[in-house]
Image (spheres, helix red, strand yellow):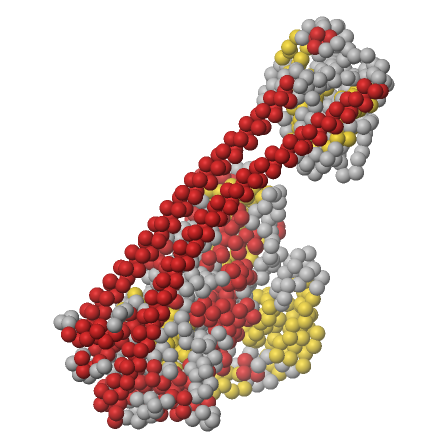
Amino acid sequence: MDILGKMGGPMNEAQKKLYKKLLKNIEAKDEEDELAQMAAAKETPAETYARKLAIERKSEEMMRAKAERRLAKKNEKEEEAMKLKIERLKKKEYEERKKKQEEEDKKVKEIEIKTHKFFRLNKFGKGIATGVVYFGDSIRVNESWIPHGFGEYKVNGEVLFDELHGAGMLEKNNSDTGEHEEGRECLFHKNRRICFTDELLPGTHIKLTGKTHHSPGATILNRLKKPGHFRVKMDVGGVQSLNLAEDAFQVNTSAARVTLLEDYVPKGGEKGAGRDGTYAEKRYDFNDDTALPTYTDHGENWYSEKAPPVDKNIDAAEEEKKRKKKEWEARLKAKQDAKDDAEKKEELAKGKAEKAAVEADAKKEAEQFAKELEDKKANLIKKREAVEAEMLRREKNADAKMKQEKTLSCPTLHAQNSGADDDIAALVADMTTAEKYSILNGVGFATKIQLSGYYVGNEPAVERLNIPSIKMQDAAQGFRTTDERMVGEVTAWPCSLAAAGAWDVALMEDWGHALGKEHRTKGANVILGPSVNVHRVAKGGRNAEYLSGESPKLGEEMVRSYVRGVQEEGVMAVVKHFALNNQENNRNTVDSHADERTMQEVYFLPFKAAVDEGVASFMCSYNLVNGTHSCGNEDLLQRDLKDRMGFEGFVMSDWWAVHDAGYQNAGLDMDMPGDDGYFSSDNLDASDEGRIDDMATRVLTQMKKVGLLGIGDSPAKFPNLCDIPNDCDDLYFNATATSPSHSSLALSIATQSVALLKNSDSVLPITGPKTIAVVGSACDAGNNISAMLKVWDLGNYYVMGGSGRVIAADPVSIVRGLKEGAGDSITIIESTTDNLDEALTAMEGADVVVTCGATTSTEGHDRDSLLVDQDDFITSLVEASTIPSVVLLNTPGATVTSNFSGKATAVLNMFLGGQVTGTAWSNIIYGVESPSGKLPVTFLKSEDDAVEPCSENPCVYDEKLEVGWRGLIEKDVDFCFGHGLSYTEFDYDIKSNDGLKFELSVENTGKTAGREVVQLYVTYPEAEDAPPVDLKGFKKTGLLQPGQSELVQFNIDSDDLRSWSVSVGDFVTVPGDFKIEFASSSRDARATATVTI
C-alpha cells in the first residue's frame, strides 16, 4: 500500500504533523479504503481529521448520554420505591406504638402503700389518673406532709421510701459553699442554680431528710426549703436501676436524666399543712418570679374519693401473685418487642436487597458501556500503530535530508559501556541537527492558555531515539490549575514562604517529594520551581513564592531540601528567577544594579546551593542586570553561573524573556515558551562552534540524571507517561494527583508555619468552657473559582495570583476551622463583616474576640500597601474591646501591624495557607499544637522603613549587604526577623565547643509540648566591612515534652565565615574573632561563644 503516493508524494513537515494527528484519532473499518478515500477527497488532511474526530466524539457523547439517562431513570425509580417502603414502615411502627399505648392506658391499678394515709402515683402527662408505673414515668406524691418515724411506702410491692425522717422539709443549701438562699424552688449544682424545669446530671441526689447522704461520685444537693413534695421525670434511656433506699433518690447510670418539674403543697399553708382536713394543689409560675401561687381545691375527701385506703395487713400470697403477674407482663412485653424488631429488620433487609439488585443492574450496564468504549479504544490504538509503522518506513525513504545525515537504525546501540558522559555524547552524536534544535525551543503555548494537549511549557519528543517530550508546569503552591476540571485534583498547598516559615528542612523535603509526585501523576516531568529570590522589596508581588525570605542562609537550606525531594521523584526542578528579580513593577524593563560582592554574598547564595544540590535547570529573569537583560547576559549566565558556580544543567528563559537572536551564545540553552523565532533554525545555525551540542548535552544529561531517559539496555527509572500533544490530555485534565496524605502534609506545613507574635496574659491557647466571638470579613473569606479562572493573576486570602496559583476547590475558612475544632465546651458567635457595631454586638457575653486580617498579592505588579485590607476595622475593634482580643493574619509577606498590635492581646501570622488555612488556625488557637513558626521577614513599624520598588532606571541596590532585616538592626520594628513565640519556654546551654563544632542542649522548661527553632547568628570582626550580624545556620528540634531536652549540633561551614573578593573572583578567608550567638530570634540571643579564624 503506497500511502505517500496516494497523498501525492512526500509531505512537508506541517503535512506530516497533521497526518500523524489524523492517524492517531480516526477509526477505519478498512484501513486501505479509508486512506484511499482521504487521498481522493478534496479536503485537506486537517479537515478530514476534524470531521472524523467530530463524528466520533458526537457518537461517544450520545452513547454516554443515553447510558446516563437510563441509569438516572432507574435510580429515580429505585429511590421512589425505597421512599414508599420507608413510609409504610414508619406508619406501621407508629400504629403499633399507638395501639400499645392505648392498651396500657386502659390498665388501671391501685397502688398499695403501707402507711396511715393513702397515696397515689400517676403516669407523667396523664393528670391525676392512676396507672402502672414504669421507668420513665412521673411519680407524684399527693400529700401535704410526711410524718416521721414510721411507715413504708410501696409501689407494686417494691419499697420506695422506707423510714423517712423529718417532715419533708427541703432546703436550698449549697453543699460546696454553705450558702443559704430563700426564694424560688431551685437547687444548686456545682455552684449553678437549677430550678424545677432544669436538667440535673446523672448521679444527682435529691435529699428528702435533714441528714446528709454521700455516695461515691454523686453530687450532693441539700434540701429545698418548702413543705410538701415534688414531681420528678426520669429518662428511660440507659436506666439500670433505681436506688431509693434510705433517704436518697438516686439514678445509678450515666445515661439517665432526672428533672425536677413541679412542687405541690396543700391549701392549709406553710406550717401544719393538711391538718385542716382539706387538700389543695399549689402551683407556681416558674417563668415569673413575682407571680403568686395558684390553688386547685380538691375537697375534704379527695383521697378517699379517688381510692379508699387498703388494709395494711396484705397477705403474703397476694403479694407473690402480684409479683409473678408483673414478671409475666414484662416477659410478654419483651417477646412482643422482639417480634416487632424482627419484622422491622426483615422489611429493611428486603428493601436493601431490592436496592442492591437495582444497583447491580446499573453497575452491570455501566461496565458493559465501559467495555465497549475500551474495545473501541483498543481497536483504534491497534490500527494507529500499524499505520504509524508504515508511515515511519515511508518517511525514511521520502526525507532527503535525513538520507544525507548519519543515523542509527537502532537507538539501543548507543555506547552502552562507555560511562554516563559517553552515553550522552553518543546520543547527541546520533541526533540530527533538526532533532537537536527541537529540544531547545519550546512549542505549543498560546497566549495565557495552553493549546489542547500541552502544558505550560513543552519540548517535543524525539521518537526515533526514544527521547520523551519535556512537559513543564508551574509550582508556587502546587500543580498550576489552568482549567476548571483540574480544580480539586491537585493540592492547593500553603505558599512557599509559609513552608520556609516553618524553618524545618525535613518538612520542606517532604513537600518536595509531594510536589514531584503530583506533577508526575499529571504527566509533567519539569516543575517550574523553586523560586528563591531574597526579599529586597517588602511589597514584592511574588514574595509569597520566594522561599528565602530576607535571608540567603534560609534560602540555601530550604532550596536544597526542595530540589532533593522533587528530583528524587523523577521530576526536574527549575530554580528561578536568576537574577536580581526583586520586584514585579516594571519587571520587563527594570535595570537592577548591584555590586559584585553584594550579588555573591546575598542574592546568589540560594542559587549556588541549588547548583550544589544538582538542580536540573535555571530560569533567567525578565529584568536587566547591570544594563543587560538577564537571559542574554553573558557575565551572569556564563561567567557567574556556569564557570564560577559550576552549573552543569541547562538555562531556560522565563516566558517571552528573550529579546533578540544570539542569546544562546551568552549562555541561554532553551527558549521558552518558544515559537517566537529567536531560536529558529537560521538563528541557531549561527551559534558558536560546539554550542548546540553543549546545549543538547546539558538537557539530556539532566533528563538521564533524574531518571527520565533510558540509555542502551538500561530503561528509564521513571517511565514516560505521555507525550505531547495528544497523549497527555487525559492526565493533564482528569488525573487526580492529590491524596489524604498530601492534605495531611499541607496541614502540617501550615500549622508549623504559624508565628505567634504576641500573647499577653497567655490568652492563648483557648480552652473551654469559653464563648468566642469571631468577627471580621477575613474570617470567612470567599473563593470565587469562576472569577479566578477568567483572570490569571487574581488571588485571594488562600492563594496568590499569577502563574504559581493553584485554585482550591473548598478551602477551609478561619471561622469554619474554629467551629469544626471547637468541641462541646467552646461556643462560637460570628459576625463576618467589617461593621464595628455588629462586631461589638457579637462580642457581648463573649470571653474573647478573634478577628482576622488578610491581604494577597500576585505576579506582574507589587503590593500597594503593607497593611492588611482590614487594618482600620481591626484597629477600631481592639481599641473598643473590653475583652481579650486575638488578631489572626493571612498575608503574602512582610506586613505593618503597628496600628493594632500594641492594643491587641495576641497577634499571630500565617503566610497564605492554601486549602487547609482554617484547620491550621484551629490547631494553633485551641492548643492542638504549640506555635513553632518563625518570621522569615520583618514586620516593620512603618512602611517608610521599607525599600520601595524602583520606578526609574537604573535601580541601584545602594543598601548593598544590608538587605532586609540586616539593614534594620538599629531600627525599632514591630516584630523582628526570626521572631516567633511558643506556648512553652526553652532554655539553651552550650555543652561543647570544638572549633566550628558546637553541641547545644535545648530544654523545654514550660508546661506544654513544643518545638523550638535554634538560630545561629554570626557577628564579623569589626574591621571587616560586613553587616553587624548575619544568620549562618538554624536547627528545629523535635516535639519536646515538658522537662525534655534535645542535643542540637552545629557544624559551621568555613565558607559561611568568608567574604567575596572582587580582585580574586572568589570567596576568601576573613581573619579575626567571630561572635557566635544561639538565639530564638535575631534579637533574642540565649547563648554566645567566640570563634577565631
Is residue 493 visible from the viewing direction of this image? yes
Q: Position of residue 566 (x, y in %)?
A: 48, 73
Residue placed farthest to the left in the image? 42
User: Residue drawn 64% across and 31% down?
Assistant: 336
* As drawn, 626 above or below 922: below
- Tell me if 762 is positioned left or right of 656 in this view: right
User: Residue drawn 44% across and 77% down?
Assistant: 719
User: Residue drawn 76% across and 13% down?
Assistant: 118
Q: Position of residue 917 (x, y in %)?
A: 49, 56
Q: Position of residue 520 (x, y in %)?
A: 44, 71
Quarter of the figure with the C terminus: bottom right
Q: Position of residue 764 (x, y in %)?
A: 59, 51
Near-viewer residue (879 or 323):
323
* As drawn, 477 above or below 331: below
- Tell me if 925 is positioned left or right of 143 in this view: left
- Tell me if 377 is positioned left or right of 616 in this view: left
Quarter of the figure with the N terminus: bottom left
User: Residue drawn 56% across and 40% down?
Assistant: 346
Near-viewer residue (1076 or 887):
887
Is residue 733 visible from the viewing direction of this image? no
Near-viewer residue (467 or 315):
315
Number of marks present in the image shown: 0
* As drawn, 712 above or below 726: below
